[in-house]
Image (cartoon, rainbow, N blue to C red):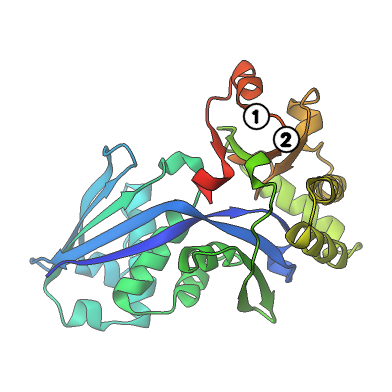
Amino acid sequence: MKKSFYSNGKLMITAEYAALDGANVLALPTKKGQNLVVEAGSGNKIYWKSFDADGSVWFEDNISFPEIINNAETENPIKNTLIKILHDAYRLNPDFIDENEGYKVETHLTFPRFWGLGTSSTLINNIAQWLEVDAFALLKNSFGGSGYDLACAQNSTPIVYHLENGVPKTEQVPFNPTFKKNIWFVYLNQKQSSKSAIAAYKKKHESIDIIPQLNELTSIILNAMTQKEFESALQQHEMLIGEILEIQPVKSRLFPDFHGTLKSLGAWGGDFIMAVSTNNPTAYFHSKGYKTIIPYDEMI
């Protein structure tokens, strides 16, 4: 008998870098996400097949039960990551191996996997649903992270998320700005390591506590009644994080002639930015070589 599970993707609107320190994160679940379909198999193994949004297969392999139990290392880094997640899930619920003969698993992304909308977080949440284990415990044991992306995976409305003494707290919030027709998401295709930025944040955070300022800005962004108020708070947020990281905000760095406001989403230099503009910015970004511009209502 087939079982199917689904999780939403995610976009982090505020409090990047500070989420692990307990800052309030405004995060938006995306319409696109990932499915996991499982059925009985045999041979004391899992036959695993992963599909990208265009239907192409990006991973396919057999994973033996002993590999999962022993957290085995192989020559394939993708397989190793999957073994690690399944090993940690096995430690939380051994029955899925001890009382079964095998599985066939397919995963289907509905967003392109390089978009950075949560290929890993949607996978972890789907595996947690399948094996009936706590997704946040599975994340903590495998990848680590604040967990806001799992909260997006599990909720279909905007959320404010924070860690309280390490415990995840999620509040569904009524974020539905009247000016959302003037919000777009632009794919930069510039994935890069965020280690140096995280190190810079941690160094500065030791001497400057920016969390109260970030929480105030998150509240203003969440509750803004006008586009002007919304953009002003986004600009202040960009300046604050930029000063901490000692990095120029994305607008001054890449798009200084853009008429409107640009906000980095998640790790700076990453995948998507948010553009707020009274005029449709599609032609502008096309002229700069960026071809993926998604309106708010199509993304969120």
Q: Amino acid at mark 2?
A: Ser
The answer to whether residue 112 is left or right of residue 232 is: left
- Say whether marks 2 and 1 touch (CB < 8 Å): yes
The residue depicted at 73 percent of the width and 68 percent of the height is: 24
What residue did someone put label 1 on?
Answer: 280
Q: Dot 2, crowdedness within 10 Å: few (<14), some or many (≥20)?
A: many
Q: Dot 1, crowdedness within 10 Å: few (<14), some or many (≥20)?
A: some
The residue depicted at 67 percent of the width and 40 percent of the height is: 182
The answer to whether residue 17 is left or right of residue 39 is: right
Q: Secondary structure at mark 2?
A: loop
What residue did someone put label 2 on?
Answer: 277
Q: Is residue 197 above or below residue 133?
A: above
The answer to whether residue 72 is left or right of residue 254 is: left
Task: Please identify the quadrant where the N terminus is shown.
Answer: bottom left
The residue depicted at 35 percent of the width and 48 percent of the height is: 109
> Could you say which quadrant of the image residue 67 lies in?
bottom left
- Residue pushed farthest front? 178
Q: Is residue 102 above or below residue 255?
A: below
Residue 4 in picture, x, y percent from top left: 25, 65
The answer to whether residue 180 is left or right of residue 132 is: right
